[in-house]
Image (spheres, rainbow, N blue to C red):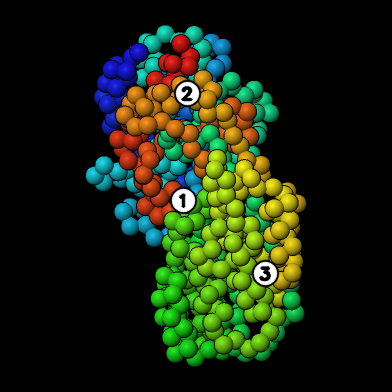
Amino acid sequence: MYKKEIGQYIDSHKEEMIEDICRLCRINSEKMPYKEGMPYGPGAFQALEEALDIADSYGFTITNYDNYVGTADLNDKEHQLDILAHLDVVPAGEGWKETEPFEPVVKGDKLFGRGTSDDKGPAMAALYAMRAVKELNIPLKKNVRLILGTDEECGSSDIAHYYSIEKEAPMTFSPDGAFPVVNTEKGGLNGHFTADWEPSAALPKLVSIKAGVKVNVVPGKASASVIGFDKEVLTSIAAECEQETGVCFELAFEGEAAHITAVGESAHASTPKEGNNALTGLLVYLTRLPFAKCPQITMLERLLELIPHGDTEGRALGIAMSDELSGGLTLAFSLLEVTQSGLSGTFDSRCPICATKENVLDVVKKNMEEKGFTLHNDSMRPPHHVDGNSDFVKTLLNAYESYTGLKGECISMGGGTYVHELNNGVAFGASLPGTDNRMHGADEFAVIDELLVSAKIFAQVIVDLCS
């Protein structure tokens, strides 16, 4: 019912929706230090204010939950459906070519800019779905609420705050994944480890390593400083390692010191094969240099043995595994800092349903300890699964098939979404199968037609679940 009306409404409001998305994407809403009244800093606060202003202008009832979360309600009837989206973004990162990160621009059929696909574009698609139902005067018996969070990328403490006040809706979907329906999300282990040693003054030596921006981002750049090498040695080994790894090495010289920047390709940590890890590439390079023998270099060699360049399945750590329902384990070495006397590192592992503390955490801890590293984790994040045969999931799949002509089915993903801790929550949209939006990478984009069809699908779901 109402498919024709919904389609015409969304198509006629295309330009308006794009402009509202751009309003939000012009705001750098990555997590910043706390300020009074701004739990995640001024950027997230500004994005939330802007989004609630947009929702208010379209006649929705808005509520601000202490600047953690904002909501827009379609009506005042019984609570039936939550749509859970977020307004915060990952850092801009390096390597943008199509536009500056916070200067959204339409080029061809795509809208480029940080947040266009993750998750400001889908958030506005959901708002326009609600707007279509409201302005078409489609009668509903129950309420749908759009929940707009501001800390999804850094732990979801915003949603924990919200659910300490409000109850979970009977049904929830988050447009922060992919179509058709993601009803299974892997568990996770963000493995934090350290090691210490006695510093050495022997030359040539490594001064420091600094790599990574966030635990859930495959590093696109990594840097190191060394002392005591001839320029020719550094240059020739860089050429060899570049050919071997695909990671480029930029060298800058300052007296006896050389500054090395490894340049790979960033990606979301849930799909590490889509990137080229600059951190592990840098370790390959450094372990080929003829340093003076010392504990620091020995530990780097051992670290590379545990997490070799290109090993995105945890094979060397002894934890590679998979199951039919959720797929294979993935691993991304995402953060590393090395000084003269120690190191601190973190890897991001997305673990299938068959993963347990015994076959993942305990194995990693044992294998790292044998090489002199201390893993500080005592627990893992459990996986999430919703029955694919439920009426809720079937309704989502039917709407998806109706508007796309594609087969609807349940899928698994490595990325955790807002619904991970909810009893009856799934990820639903907003990209179609085969689309790589470069989430968390340079030149992130949303396909405009996919945002439009998402809005249509969401509107149909609201009608089907709340009438």
Residue wearing tag 1 = 440
Residue at the (59%, 20%) spot, across then down: 170
Q: How many neighbours does mark 3 have within 10 angstroms: few (below 14), some (14-19), or many (20 or more)?
A: many
Q: Secondary structure at mark 2?
A: helix
Is there a contact, CB below 8 Å, between mark 2 and mark 1?
Answer: no
Q: CA distance from mark 2 to mark 3?
A: 49 Å
Q: How many neighbours does mark 2 have within 10 angstroms: few (below 14), some (14-19), or many (20 or more)?
A: some
Name the image quarter holding residue 155: top right
Choose the circle earlier in sequence order: 3 or 1: 3
| Quarter of the picture holding the N terminus | top left
Looking at the picture, which amino acid does disc 3 mark?
A: Leu
Choose the circle earlier in sequence order: 2 or 3: 3
Q: Is residue 424 left or right of residue 261?
A: right
Q: CA distance from mark 2 to mark 1?
A: 30 Å
Task: Please tell me the numbered disc located at residue 343.
Answer: 3
Residue at the (39%, 20%) spot, across then down: 460
How many numbered marks, from 0 up?
A: 3
Name the image quarter holding residue 122: top left
Q: CA distance from mark 3 to mark 1?
A: 26 Å
Task: Please tell me the numbered disc located at residue 394.
Answer: 2
Is residue 328 among what the camera can see?
yes
Looking at the picture, which amino acid does disc 2 mark?
A: Lys
User: In the figure, 414 relative to 449: above or below?
Assistant: below
The percent position of residue 303, horizontal first and vertical second, equals: 63, 70
Choose the circle earlier in sequence order: 2 or 1: 2
User: In the figure, 290 relative to 41: above or below?
Assistant: below
Of labels 2 and 3, the one closer to you: 2
Q: Nearer the viewer, residue 83 or 399?
A: 399
Q: Secondary structure at mark 3?
A: strand
